[in-house]
Amino acid sequence: MSKKILLIDDDTDLINVYKPFLQKHGFEVEAAYNSEEGKKLFKSFKPDVVFADLVMEHFDSGFVLCHWMNQQPERKNAHVVILTSTGHETGYRFSTQTSEEKTWINADDYLEKPISPNDLLQYIKDKVLKET
Amino acid sequence: MKILDARILIIDADTEVVEFLKNHLGTQHVIESTGSGIDGIAKGSSSEYDIYFISMSLPDISGRDVLHAIRKVHEEAICIMMSSNPSIDSAVQTTQMGAYNYISKPFDPEKIIPMVHRALERRWYILEARRLREERENNLAELSVDKSRLATVINSIDDGILVINQNKEIIFYNPRFLQLIDTDRQILIGDSMFRYLPQSLQKQICEILQKAESDGKTGAIKQELVIKPPFELVVMANTAPIFGENGQCLGVVSVLRDITEMKQLEQSKSRFVNMVAHELKAPLAAIHSYLKMILDNALGDDIVTYNTYMKRSLERTEALMELINDLMNIFRMDSKAVKRNLEKVEMADLLENTVELFRPQMEEREISVNLALKHGLFVKADPEEIRRVFTNLISNAIKYNKYEGSIDISCVEDGRWVKVSVKDTGIGMTADEKDRLFQEFFRAKNKFTRDITGTGLGLAILKKIVDEYAGRITVDTEFGKGSTFTVYLPRVMSGE
């Protein structure tokens, strides 16, 4: 059975590229453009991998979403990655730059944008497919 | 060292004596005389004479009383007592009372002339000493005025000043200094600096003292010190050694200047640059990944998706160019390099013309527009800038409107203002979004705005323009219902 990937990002361009690309490589892919849609899909789609943006409707949407996912039973089987390009230098109050922040967000991994579709695919192969 | 034109007062009822002295001294000096002791006291004390000749025996009062009275007023008066009945006792007594000399009558001219010369010489010394004394007193008075003036200046100066001796004790500071090291404590003069000063400043002072001691010579150290992090209170501390006459280091003087505002500005500038970089990077990254997907043939022969990628790349390229134009406008406005062609602008005409430009876009989304414009209202402004304001507002009213929505544009007078409102039936804003609306690069993010492109600078520019004309802009909005932007610009009369 193919792995299920959930993309949660308000960046249309990112979804436009990742979604068909990952589908092309045999994954089942769903996309959400904000954390509310993300939550719904997390429950119904039951993804194996989640890539979530940090700053969506709010500067902290990603980590609030992450905390929520951590409390769901579906979280056990999901590998959750925070994908972000924002940092303190752009005036955001929150980022994934420090270890305190990472501990606080409590995701499985953190990736910096932009990440090319090929790199993303490689990441999934290395981190997710090998573990299972 | 002789006094010419000395003023001499003779107090004697004996006319022979008076005549004698006038004959021998009158050619060089000014001589006055009186036969009465009372009159002599009155004359002699009202102004100071250079020499007083006082007879011991006067018709009204004794010569001793006259001497006493005159010396009481003029402590240094040179009084020569004359007696036709001299005695050792009275000579001693009057000398003790301050008489300069005691001579017997009749006079010996051979003796009296040199004696008067000596008396005048003495008088010259007395006057000179008095002059020097007064001069000194004046200087002291001046000096103390100077001192308090300097203290006032130092205490009013907007820089903090601190003086430390080589034992690292605080010798002097002004009130501003306490503010700039952010302390409420009163520092005692002579206390160790380690008890009060921020460590960074202590370090700077120690460094200077050490260098001055080992090398004998050292320059000033200039350094930024963060007193309240991160940027609440930042000072520039300029510390220099104080050298004595023999070249030994006596201590240091530190001058603290508040550079908080400068640092904050610097900070917000660098944040702006970071945000710009971020805003430029995002669309470029998107375009890059689209192109790469196409060139890599990453989706095989999915021509439809490739086509979407190319369209989207084009859109984002256009948005990038728009962003760069907006950035250039913001920089131009911030550097005040904008050349304005001030004209009287008729608002209704300008609004009608601007709306015409948007007809095709409105028709495309079947948005209707209602104009309620009062003609004959003028503002004095650069028409291009005013047009930009309303182009921006109307363009937003279309972009963020719903399909088959409407736009109401009104232009009325409101006191000394021309009030223009642009009301849409669009997606509106939340309170949080409304608060951040005029921030550079802020764009409301929700499912409705996802596919709407914008630079995030339009409203920031608009606000800068309106501010430039001393106008204001207000926003009335309800999420999901629509927004009304109202611009107030100062009205000018048609005759002005």
Image (tube, rainbow, N blue to C red):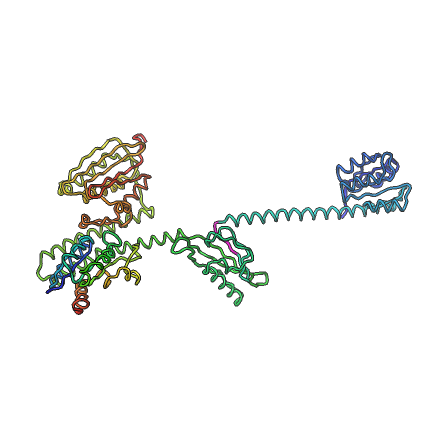
Relative to the observer, which residue lies in front, B155 or A127? A127
Q: Residue A114 placed where, x, y %? A: 22, 60
Instruction: Judge whether A14 appears above or below B110 on screen.
Output: below
- Most common secondary structure along the magenta stretch: strand
Q: Residue B283 placed where, x, y %? A: 21, 55
Quarter of the image holding residue B87?
top right
Residue placed farthest to the bottom in the image? A130
- Chain part drawn in magenta: B158-162
Q: Does B159 appear in magenta? A: yes
Quarter of the image holding residue B407?
top left
Relative to the observer, which residue lies in front, B106 or B190? B190
Q: Residue B429 placed where, x, y %? A: 23, 44
The number of callouts visible is 0
Q: Does B352 appear in magenta? A: no
Relative to the observer, which residue lies in front, B127 or B20? B127
Quarter of the image holding residue A16?
bottom left
Q: Quadrant of the C terminus of chain B?
A: top left
Instruction: Judge whether B378 appears above or below A20 on screen.
Output: above
Q: Residue B71 placed where, x, y %? A: 78, 42
Residue placed farthest to the top in the image? B495
